[in-house]
Amino acid sequence: MRKVTLLIILLLMAVAPVLAIGEEKQTPANLEYSFYIDPLAGPDKAEFEIVLQNQGNTELSFEFPTSQKYEITVFDANKKKVYQYSEGKSFTQAFETLTLKPQGKMKWMESWDYSTAGKRVPEGEYTVTAQLKATSINGKPVGDKKPLTDTKTMYIPGENPVFKGVVSEGNKGNYIIKGEARPINGKFFYTVEDGHNQLIPETEVAPGAKYPKWKPFSLEISIPESKLPQNGSVILNLYERGKDGEIIHTYPVLLERFNNHN
């Protein structure tokens, strides 16, 4: 009887590693990847950076039933949908595969002009949800959608009465910024900073017009490469000063993002 028991124990010990190996086969639930959205609410529009990253040492293939890779949805404080990325868009109805090498990363950028039903949404806090539309990973169906979904909040500012339509172009410290302004006192100011350090001190601009007339303006900004952040954002702050010198009507403009880990 002891021999039979010992034989059973030995058999179980021999089979256990095989069972363990079978249990540790990668499934979509334990593959090492991350998916997230980073919303940035500017004065005139929101910019969404969507990132899919392979954080493991195995190549990952994400299969999609159409050419749509992700969905972005924005809800107001009452959970009413005010924006959906896919609305009004058409996608190819054919399977597509996105393959990421170990430690590889894929980024997408989208934007929204704050309009819903032809009107700008009110100032306030909004919820942004992004979902990767992959249905299988490395040939295995995706059962749990949570790892492929991310939710963030953002605060949408009210419409700025002094600045509008501001856009920037350029990189590596050299930028051209264009837009329209109608400063109440006929002049406005700007600074440039990286969130920690001021890269350009307060500078005065006189566009040649006063409120309520809009006037185009253009700025050329150059920052030495040695002052640029390794990780962080370069931001232009447009603003006016009130009668008592206080800063009013602030309008931030993202000039460039830097990330050494890209």
Image (cartoon, grey):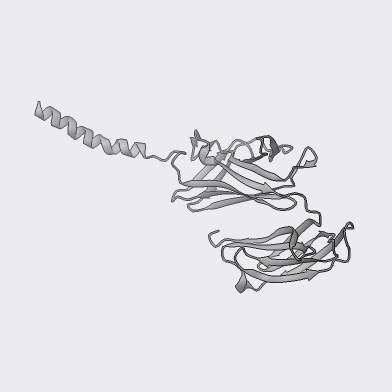
**Percent position (x, y) of residue 244?**
77, 65
Query: Can residue 223 be seen from the camera position used here?
Result: yes
- The residue at the point 71 percent across, 67 percent down is 191
Residue most extreme to the top: 1
**Percent position (x, y) of residue 145?**
53, 36
- The residue at the point 52 percent across, 53 percent down is 104
Which residue is at the front of the view, 47 or 31? 47
Query: On the image, which quarter does residue 31 sit in?
Result: top left
Which residue is at the front of the view, 212 or 33? 212
- As drawn, is 176 to the left or to the right of 211? left
Identify whether 81 is placed above or below 203. above
Quadrant holding the N terminus: top left
Query: On the image, which quarter does residue 192 sit in?
Result: bottom right
Identify whether 184 is placed above or below 99. below
**Percent position (x, y) of residue 173?**
67, 69
Query: Can residue 69 be seen from the camera position used here?
Result: no
Which residue is at the front of the view, 137 or 77? 77
**Percent position (x, y) of residue 229?**
59, 67
Quadrant holding the C terminus: bottom right
Q: How many marks?
A: 0
